[in-house]
Amino acid sequence: MADRWQNTMEHAVSAARRAGQVVCEALQDDRKVMTKSSSVDLVTQTDQKVEQLIIQSVKEKFPTHRFIGEESVAAGEVCVLTDDPTWIIDPIDGTTNFVHTFPFVAVSIAFSVNKQVEFGVVYSCLEDKMFTARRGRGAFCNGKPLQVSGQEDIKQSVIATEFGSSRDPEAVDKIFTSLKNILCIPVHGVRGAGTAAINMCLVASGCVEAYYEIGMHIWDVAAGSLIVSEAGGVLMDVEGGAVDLMSRRIVAANNGTIAERIVKEIDAFSPPRDDDPPPQK
Ligand code: IPD
């Protein structure tokens, strides 16, 4: 059956590849680092330039589509998901990695219609791995089908997570409590690539059994969430139940048994939502 969004997805893949080339080239140059919500929430001119490149190329081809872009939101645009076709863009997922040349950075592009992600593209540009998923049609890496791990035993598992960019001591305490609980199950190990999008692709590839985080944003995980579910995995809120991409809380796992076991160990909290109105100045 013909796929209504095939052209759109092809555009996303080539936009992600071009964006990834710009990111890789910029890694050779000096990177001017700026900060956003705090001194550890980093942004560079490359993040801003790459987001504009992607948005411009989409606007030329699909002038009625909407956008949620990490750097556009940081510049004051609202972060609202409507039923309209919407591109959810993270130009560099792993900006801290990019700044420090830690070798995992990704361009993440999701496309949502009626608030449902139709396709997701994550380009891990230094590894030259193009992860793609189309709703109902599977997940792929460089064209090869992806399948999550078949592991059911958490004690035989590796779990990915991140510390995020909050340094609020109460939040950090909760993050460490969850980490300790999970480590001491015990699991085989805990890892973090420094990018939510790549962590999710690692789940989809079967390299880790699960990824969880509180504090990431919709643009970090929208594409990865479809890649995980199309590779056979499950998504859950950190307190169980359905995931809400605006809530900044996610568990992405190979199966429900592992996801529910992780949920039991998480000391949950709720950061401000991505779709909260911006604070009054
Ligand atoms: C960040 C990365 C990081 C995660 C943070 C994200 P950015 O995204 O995905 O792994 O821990 O929560 O904000 O800022 O590099 O696009």
Image (cartoon, rainbow, N blue to C red):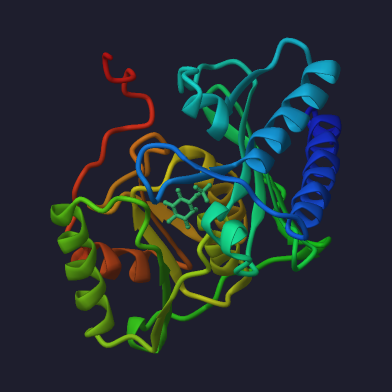
x and y, in percent, of residue 130 in the image: 77, 57
x and y, in percent, of residue 233 in the image: 51, 61
x and y, in percent, of residue 177 in the image: 17, 69
x and y, in percent, of residue 266 in the image: 21, 63
Which residue occupies the foreground of this view, 3 or 210? 210
**Residue at 82% from the left image edge and 62% from the top image edge:** 142
Q: In this view, does 274 lie to the left or right of 113?
A: left
**Residue at 31% from the left image edge and 32% from the top image edge:** 273
In the rendered image, which quarter contains the C terminus?
A: top left
Which residue occupies the foreground of this view, 23 or 195? 23
Which residue occupies the foreground of this view, 177 or 232? 177
In the rendered image, which quarter contains the N terminus?
A: top right
Q: Is residue 38 above or below residue 259?
A: above
Can you tell which quarter of the image residue 106 is in?
bottom right
**Residue at 62% from the left image edge and 36% from the top image edge:** 89
**Residue at 33% from the left image edge and 87% from the top image edge:** 155
Q: In this view, does 245 lie above or below 263?
A: above
Q: Can residue 134 be seen in this snapshot? A: yes
Q: Can residue 135 be seen in this snapshot? A: no
Q: Is residue 233 left or right of residue 172?
A: right
